[in-house]
């Protein structure tokens, strides 16, 4: 395409935005509303996702070694566990270390456990970590079959609940966002369609004098893109300022290691870029969709 | 130039508009298409710029069968055909200049050539001094001249006019006809559907008379009338 033609399309597209100002307001409004909701939802969802991820990272599996196992057998077991699929680390923790941990975890009550220091009833343990929480089930089944394993535990309930929660949160999130986006596209394409009826003569004359469909479509493309951009201004501002506020006020108050908001930089910028992208896609899609019907003349 | 072989056109609502049309029109011909309303004149004309395709039969324009034309090829066919309507079909918000330039803009001509061509063609139809006017400020005859300017700016081989004088008074109609004769004298084929008995009988040309979707008469230097 020639540069002058591109210039013409940009001019025409912008002109249409100004000329049909009420239509622009309606369409931009639809994009804005959608993106505000999408923005809030995405922020929420991604942070929840991060939270779940953090909890997932805390999950580990304990393999209790039989008391009767000697050193060679323990080494052999370690090797075997390392061979299991998806195991990322295997760490040995002696029964003395386990007791120390227990005493520490129990706090005041831990004192009474000190009695056992002379005759430690605990097992030596391998602490096993997997890449993902969903893999512990399969790993535990494998490891149980090895000799010299007394028992295998991991926070099965926590993991399973977490995984289900995460799964549904994701499904619902995507369904919600898709529905929002589709609604916006529909709204925009309908608003623009109304103005196209006024522009129908222009389109039919263009066709009559031999304009290609792509030539007719371009200004609408530009128009949609501009409307998407305009529509994403408020949502982006909202995300940037809102998240900044939330981040500075929320993170200071909560001091749990795994409850942590995603850092403002780059998260808020990424979301902003994403919103701009979604806005532009919605605008272009709605606009181009509305002109399609009128091209078959 | 244009050849129709056994062309039938039946619309979706069951109306038969063309009922076996055979005709050949040569480059440089000036043809009137006459007949009562509903005789199929407009359908006949629409075949020539592929606004419609035949239900049966073939239409060839410069040897190309238009029924087999791909969607992408249609714009290129239309660039060789200028079309003029009874209701002018000008863009009301654009100036005379812009309305005419539009035809070159959409085929991506460079702006220098557009300016040169537009002024030249406006001079040809006698509207150079009104280039900045918008259609509403012009008389009917002037508006039709703008439409003609737009139709001929590409130097098309064929100009099709569907009742171009239908909305104009007799005097203005003759102005329009003089422009058509002028274009025709330079070798452009002109096909014009009309109800104007005066024009057909005074400015003698080939007459194709249609009735009930068929050509009932085809005479060189013919008279108005469509009885077989």
Image: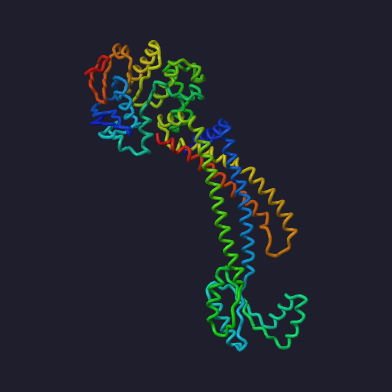
Q: Nearer the viewer, residue A48 or A17?
A: A48
> Where residue B3 appears, x then y in whole percent?
26, 29
- Position of the C terminus of chain B, as image quadrant, is top left
Q: Is residue B186 left or right of residue B120?
A: left
Q: Nearer the viewer, residue A125 or B112?
A: A125
Q: Is residue B224 visible?
A: yes
> Where residue B17 appears, x then y in whole percent?
29, 28
Question: In which quarter of the view is residue B109 placed?
Answer: top left
Question: In which quarter of the view is residue A31 placed?
Answer: top right
Q: Is residue B30 visible?
A: no
Q: Residue at x 72, y 80 (%)?
A: A100
Q: Is residue A59 left or right of residue A111?
A: left
Q: Residue at x 61, y 87 (%)?
A: A71
Is residue B80 shown above or below B201? below
Q: How is the image coloured?
A: rainbow
- Position of the N terminus of chain B, as image quadrant, is top left
Q: Residue at x 59, y 45 (%)?
A: A34
Q: Residue at x 69, y 48 (%)?
A: A241
> Where residue A258 appears, x then y in whole percent?
68, 64
Q: Is residue A100 left or right of residue B155?
A: right
Number of marks: 0
Question: In which quarter of the view is residue A214 placed?
Answer: top left
> Where residue A25 appears, x then y in whole percent?
59, 36
Is residue A107 shown above or below A166? below
Is residue B117 shown above or below A180? above
Q: Nearer the viewer, residue B167 or A280?
A: B167
């Amino acid at each position: 395409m020639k540069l002058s033609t591109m210039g013409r399309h940009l001019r025409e597209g912008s002109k249409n935005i100004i000329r049909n100002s009420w239509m622009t307001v309606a369409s931009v409004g639809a994009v804005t509303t959608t993106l505000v909701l999408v923005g809030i939802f995405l922020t929420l969802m991604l942070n929840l996702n991060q939270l779940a991820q953090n909890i997932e990272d805390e999950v580990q599996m304990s393999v209790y070694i039989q008391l009767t196992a000697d050193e060679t057998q323990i080494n052999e077991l370690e090797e075997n566990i390392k061979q299991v699929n998806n195991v990322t680390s295997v760490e040995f923790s002696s029964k003395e270390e386990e007791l120390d941990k227990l005493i520490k975890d129990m706090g005041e009550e831990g004192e009474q456990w000190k009695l056992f220091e002379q005759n430690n009833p605990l097992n030596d343990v391998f602490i096993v970590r997997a890449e993902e929480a969903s893999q512990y089930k399969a790993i535990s089944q494998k490891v149980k079959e090895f000799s010299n394993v007394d028992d295998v535990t991991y926070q099965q309930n926590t993991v399973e609940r977490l995984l289900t929660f995460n799964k549904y949160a994701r499904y619902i999130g995507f369904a919600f966002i898709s529905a929002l986006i589709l609604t916006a596209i529909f709204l925009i394409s309908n608003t623009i369609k109304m103005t196209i009826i006024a522009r129908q003569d222009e389109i039919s004359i263009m066709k009559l004098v031999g304009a290609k469909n792509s030539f007719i479509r371009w200004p609408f493309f530009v128009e949609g893109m501009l409307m998407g951009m305009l529509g994403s201004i408020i949502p982006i501002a909202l995300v940037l300022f809102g998240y900044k506020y939330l981040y500075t006020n929320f993170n200071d108050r909560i001091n749990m290691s795994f409850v942590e908001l995603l850092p403002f930089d780059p998260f808020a910028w990424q979301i902003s870029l994403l919103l701009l992208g979604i806005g532009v896609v919605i605008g272009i899609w709605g606009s181009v969709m509305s002109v399609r019907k009128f091209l078959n003349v | 130039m244009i050849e129709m072989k056994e062309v039938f056109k039946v619309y979706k609502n069951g109306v038969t508009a063309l009922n076996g049309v055979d005709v050949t029109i040569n480059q440089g011909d000036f043809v009137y298409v006459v007949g009562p309303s509903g005789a199929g004149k407009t359908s006949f004309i629409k075949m020539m710029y592929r606004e419609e395709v035949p239900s049966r039969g073939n239409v060839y324009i410069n040897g190309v069968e238009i029924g087999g034309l791909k969607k992408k090829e249609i714009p290129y066919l239309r660039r060789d055909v200028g079309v003029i309507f009874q209701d002018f079909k000008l863009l009301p918000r654009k100036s005379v200049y812009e309305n005419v330039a539009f035809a070159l803009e959409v085929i991506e001509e460079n702006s220098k050539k557009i300016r040169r061509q537009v002024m030249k063609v406006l001079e040809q139809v006698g509207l150079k001094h009104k280039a900045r006017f918008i259609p509403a400020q012009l008389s009917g005859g002037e508006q039709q001249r703008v439409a003609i300017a737009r139709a001929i700016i590409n130097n098309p081989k064929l100009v099709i006019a569907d009742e171009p004088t239908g909305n104009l008074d007799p005097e203005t109609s003759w102005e329009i006809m003089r422009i058509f004769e002028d274009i025709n004298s330079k070798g452009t084929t002109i096909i014009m559907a009309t109800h104007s008995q005066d024009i057909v009988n005074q400015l003698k040309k080939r007459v194709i008379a249609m009735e009930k979707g068929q050509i009932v008469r085809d005479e060189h230097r013919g008279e108005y009338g469509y009885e077989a």
